[in-house]
Image: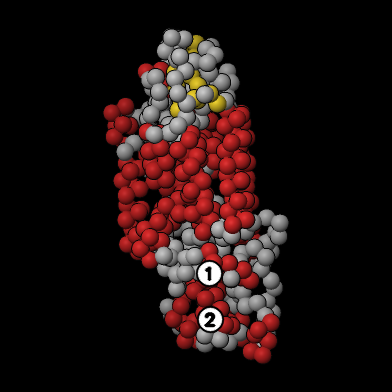
Amino acid sequence: MKINSKTLGIIILVVLFGGIALSATMGWWQTSGGGGGSGGGNGQGSSGSQAGQGAHTDEGSQEVGNDGNPEDRDNRDFHIRGRTTFQELLDWGLPVEIIETVIGGPLPDPATRINRYCSEQGLDFETVKEALQLELDRLAGGE
Amino acid sequence: MKLFGIRLFRPKSIWIRRLIQLFFFVLIGLIAINHSLTESGAGISFLSSASLHALCPFGGVVSLYEYATSGTFVQKIRDSSFVLMTIVFGLAILFGPVFCGWVCPLGTVQEWTGKFGRRLFGVKRYNHFIPIKMDRVLRYARYGVLAWVLYVTAQSGRLIFQSYDPYFALFNFWTGEVAASALLILGLSLGLSLIVERPWCKYACPYGALLGLSNLLRVFSIRRAVSTCRADGACQTLCPMNIPVDDLKVVRDHQCITCLECTSEACCPVKGTVVLAAGEIE
């Protein structure tokens, strides 16, 4: 049985995107979420655990205000993004000690953007973001 | 045009492969840019903003140990990496490392750079600078890289390879997250592409090493009909991975990337002589 290049090209595209579509239907296609990674905090690798964190996935994230109020916590999406500052974390109720533990040093000027701080300190923003997000989620969940 | 019986340029190319390569390069590039935009609060909503780690099938491979022993992923790896790993393995069992030859954007960029090298040095000299003996030994280096990557990832639970990964560097060089070592390796790979086709793939890519093993058992292989072969050396000269196709009946070389450039659809002048097929062809 011979296969020419056009057929092979079509098979590759169909299998790749068909496989992705199928896995998305089954709920296995998760490209974001704080659950994975032993290095980024508590690892919870199953898709189920990540599916529950869809509110702060890379896709479909919502805007977050700067004036966090503990009373509004249940109705707000505390999603760390590239422009999020340390002040916002504090406003959302994250204790200074936890922030300092995650970043491995004293809290910088609260007005500093987290991603800029990571870049200056040679830290991986994704890792820090996930760890802080996990703490925020715990806080929001009342753990 | 021929010189000493060797065809000097290919009359045809596998255009659909070029098209698919371009498609994946643009797609991954756009997703990487959108990821950066999303981080700064200005992402494009209809386009995925997943991180490159989530879209890398090799991420699934390096996470296997972690997942098997503790049920967690290596840092930054997601379910999607496992899904892609499974799909790519499935394709490899059927057709060999088509991911390398048709999808991987880093391979594509090396090929594009190689076009300049081919123009500079000519088809016959380009990709034939490294002495054969040294080349043969160097080609096994990627298995060492694979073993090292798997070991350090299993040990640390972190993507140590990111600091050396030219693929990550290629699509993140603007973010400030890329280690100098990764940029250096990317620069070296592209620089070497001017004299060797796909140097990263040939000598260092750990995922290519793993997928290359599928050549030993793949269902559809590159097969040569000995009875109609002119043995003009065109396939060997033009194979990006320097595989002596005209000496083989079935290509089982661990470096084949199923680019099909050796087949009768591209450089082989005799119809039906070099084909991708399952089972005997004559």
Is B92 in front, or is B270? Answer: B92
Is B8 in front, or is B187? Answer: B8
Q: The residue tagged with tag 1: helix, strand or loop?
A: helix
Give the residue displayed 45% in from the left and 73% down from the top.
A41
Query: Which residue position holds label 1?
Result: A49
Rendered location of residue B143, percent (x, y): 33, 43
Q: The residue tagged with tag 2: helix, strand or loop?
A: helix
Query: Which residue position holds label 2?
Result: A138
The crowding category of the residue bearing disc 1, from other C-alpha atoms within 10 Å (few below 14, some 14 to 19, many at least 20), is some
Query: Within the image, what quadrant is residue B221 found in?
Result: top left
Q: Amino acid at mark 2?
A: Arg
Q: Is residue B172 visible?
A: no
Disc 1 from disc 2: Cα separation: 14 Å
Q: Amino acid at mark 1?
A: Ser
Looking at the rendering, in which quadrant would you find the C terminus of chain B? top left
Outermost residue toward the bottom in this view: A71
Answer with mark 1 or mark 2, whichever residue precedes in sequence: 1
Query: Within the image, what quadrant is residue A69 found in?
Result: bottom right
